[in-house]
Image (cartoon, helix red, strand yellow):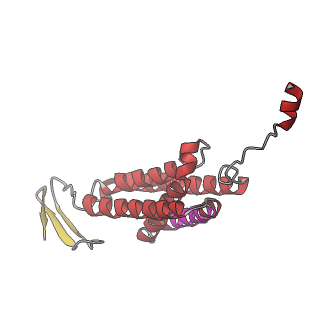
Amino acid sequence: MYGALISEISVEPVAVPSVVREGRISRLLLIIAIVVAEADEALYIFVIVNQGSDRPADVLTVPFVASFIQLMAVLLGVSMLTSPAVIRFRPALRAGAAAGLLVLGVFGAFSIGAPLFIAGAVATGVAVRTLTLTPGWKSIVSALAAAAVVVALLVTGFEVTARVIECPTDGSSGGNWAGIVTRGFSWECTGGQVHFQ
């Protein structure tokens, strides 16, 4: 009786989503993007710290940029995990990090931007591949939404930190901020006080 019952039971292999079984090349490309972004961040901080008295007056911009690069690297690193919750958000994690690195690479084109743009391009390639392996429109919507949120965070961070000016106690200095989505402004430091125009 039991033998006949067991012979009728067929064991079907459990289908594993293709995004779980992503190849070694995708993982290697993500590692390359992370390493390039982290190395660029380390070089950026090293250059700023060793500028001495020529450090930028907008004292929060450098920490913001370094933290933003770190966040993009963390998003890419987390997207490599294989837990079901992470796999569901892989397209969003990768698209968000790719967009952030690409846009920051454009903003910093004349300083730290080129390596970040390359890291962003590599991450974009992996993000697109992840989307092709993830069926459904929800993945595309989540990826686009994540990219928009990350770029909005970057722009907002620049707009806010550019307005935090620390003046030296003596001497005078000045500068300007062109603005990204808001009107630009000029500032001048005299006697330790900042004056915006």
Q: Is residue 121 magenta?
A: yes
Q: Is residue 57 visible?
A: no
Q: Position of residue 50 (x, y in %)?
A: 40, 53
Q: Position of residue 165 (x, y in %)?
A: 21, 58
Residue 111, above or below 5 = below
Q: Residue at x 83, y 31 (%)?
A: 5
Q: Exactly how many numbered labels are in the figure?
A: 0
Image check: 54 left or right of 92?
left
Q: Position of residue 141 (x, y in %)?
A: 47, 63
Q: Is residue 78 magenta?
A: no
Image check: 181 left or right of 93?
left
Residue 107: image quadrant is: bottom left
Residue at the top extreme, as displayed: 2
Residue 152: image quadrant is: bottom left
Q: Residue at x 45, y 50 (%)?
A: 71
Range shown magenta: 114-129
Q: Residue at x 44, y 59 (%)?
A: 146
Q: Position of residue 108 (x, y in %)?
A: 43, 67
Q: Main secondary structure of the magenta part?
A: helix
Image check: 11 left or right of 83?
right
Q: Residue at x 54, y 53 (%)?
A: 39
The residue lying toward the viewer, choosing from 5 and 140, is 5
The quarter of the picture where the N terminus appears is top right
The residue lying toward the viewer, choosing from 100 and 49, is 100
Q: Is residue 178 visible?
A: yes
Residue 117, above or below 65 = below
The quarter of the picture where the C terminus appears is bottom left
The residue lying toward the viewer, choosing from 59 and 84, is 84
